[in-house]
Image (cartoon, helix red, strand yellow):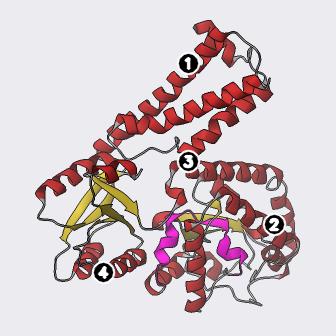
Amino acid sequence: MYLFIKNILLGYYFDFTQVFALSLAWILPSLFFKSFDIPRTKSTIVAVRSSIYSYFIFIVFYSILILIGLLPKLTVNFHFFFLSFGLLIIVGFAYARFRFIYGYRIKGKNVRYAVFIGDTHSQEAITNIKEDAILYGYQFVNFIDRNGKDVARELKQVIMNRKVNLLFVLHNNRNRINYDSIAAQCDDHGIRMKLLLTGDGLIKTRTGLDVLGGFPVLDIRHEPLLYLGNRMMKRSVDVIMSTLSIVCVMSWLPIVVKIAQMISYPGSLFFKQKRIGRNGEIFNMIKFRTMVQTRESDLAKDGNSKKTREQDERVPWFGKLLRRTNLDEYPQFFNVLFGSMSTVGPRPHMVGEDEILEKTVPKYRVRRFVKPGITGWAAINGYRGGTDDMELMMKRTNQDIWYLENWSIWLDIKIMAITVWQMLTFRIPKAY
């Protein structure tokens, strides 16, 4: 067995092309069955089921590759041992990953705080939900009776006094809850809302949804990036894009920018400013300095400067060129590489501006569900830069929410391609 594993690792059986074909044969079914995701469950069978499904499809692809001659004609014993060893590794990894996350959550780590709205008189249901919540990494801070006089008002009081990430609402036909009002309140405070569905055993086993306390859990907003597999894909693209950009462009561009700065507006090469990222976390965004360095610009590092306007006197000619071509944003690939930003996502706002917008623009905090980006769907459609027009800011927020609800790797590629075209043709909207 040792010699068998060693020969596989050293490439004695498969060349590069064959390894690439085998990799695709595994990646495709794995993405389809979402075997990269870690289901919020306490069932070992459920935790490894998607990996088993994916592997059986891999076996089918493996057999096809042998029949069409893309894999070497080795002995039956080799194929049997290779596939058996692969199954053992895949299922073993899925099981070990599940047990690690399972134990991590039981210890109270990776906790998300939640509120429950439902029948609080059903002690059995509440007990089951509490037990599952610990295993799934949820901690309930309050239970609200759905038959109360003013459920929305009671929920608002809880949100104002406690940190809340999630809201679970037990749904049935006897509910007196105004779902639209509750959902709007969750959106305004950046809280994800989920429905707990009631039904018989058939519904519980065939929905394919996570189950909490015996109730299938339904997300009211479609968010593809909630799935680990999708996040891994997006992160992989981010790492590739940031690495290539830093090696191929940032290895020489800062020299050119620094020389031009020394001629037109001396001062520091880079400008760092506090911005709001995913889940409201503050990070330091880096970019090439495009303004004349003054005391005001030094204070702007905390994210409280005046918004840039068209024909702004603080921006000299070379700074305007950097902005027109979007090259001033290039250093943000360091933010992408280190994980505080993504290549594509909602553009991050200054701290001071963000604090105002979250209080005045409906659903504004929903855009924080994903990482901010160097470019984004709203940005390529002209919704970018500072503005005091709340109607335009609402449209920008809606564009950002549309992006996170309709994300796909192809949408990211489309946005990046449009951004590059706008840079090359000097057609970046509102680049001042």
Rounded to the nearest angstrom, the CA distance separating label 2 from label 4 is: 45 Å
Q: What kind of residue is marked 3?
A: Gly
Q: Is residue 330 visible?
A: no
Instruction: Tell me the mark number nearer the camera, choosing from 2 and 1.
Output: 1
Q: Answer above or below: position of 87 versus 214.
A: above
Q: Which residue is mark 1?
A: 85
Task: Report helix, strand or loop for mark 1.
Answer: helix
Q: What kind of residue is marked 4?
A: Asn
How busy is the neighbourhood of tag 1: few (under 14 within 10 Å), some, or many (20 plus)? few
Asked if the residue at tag 1 contacts the one at tag 2, i.e. Cβ–Cβ closer than 8 Å, the answer is no
Q: Nearer the viewer, residue 263 or 158?
A: 158
Q: What kind of residue is marked 1?
A: Phe
The mark that comes first in sequence, 4 or 1, is: 1
Q: Which residues are magenta?
A: 362-382
Q: Which residue is mark 4?
A: 178
Q: Say if the magenta span includes residue 373.
A: yes
How busy is the neighbourhood of tag 4: few (under 14 within 10 Å), some, or many (20 plus)? few
Residue 124 percent location from the top left of the image: 13, 54
Q: Which residue is mark 3?
A: 229
Instruction: Tell me the mark number nearer the camera, choosing from 3 and 2.
Output: 3
Asked if the residue at tag 4 contacts the one at tag 3, i.e. Cβ–Cβ closer than 8 Å, the answer is no
Residue 233 percent location from the top left of the image: 62, 49
The mark that comes first in sequence, 2 or 1, is: 1
Residue at (82%, 73%) from the top-left corner?
A: 422
Say which mark, if any, is on residue 420: 2
Q: Quarter of the image for the C terminus: give it.
A: bottom right
Asked if the residue at tag 2 contacts the one at tag 3, i.e. Cβ–Cβ closer than 8 Å, the answer is no
Rounded to the nearest angstrom, the CA distance separating label 1 from label 3 is: 24 Å
Q: Nearer the viewer, residue 423 or 215?
A: 215
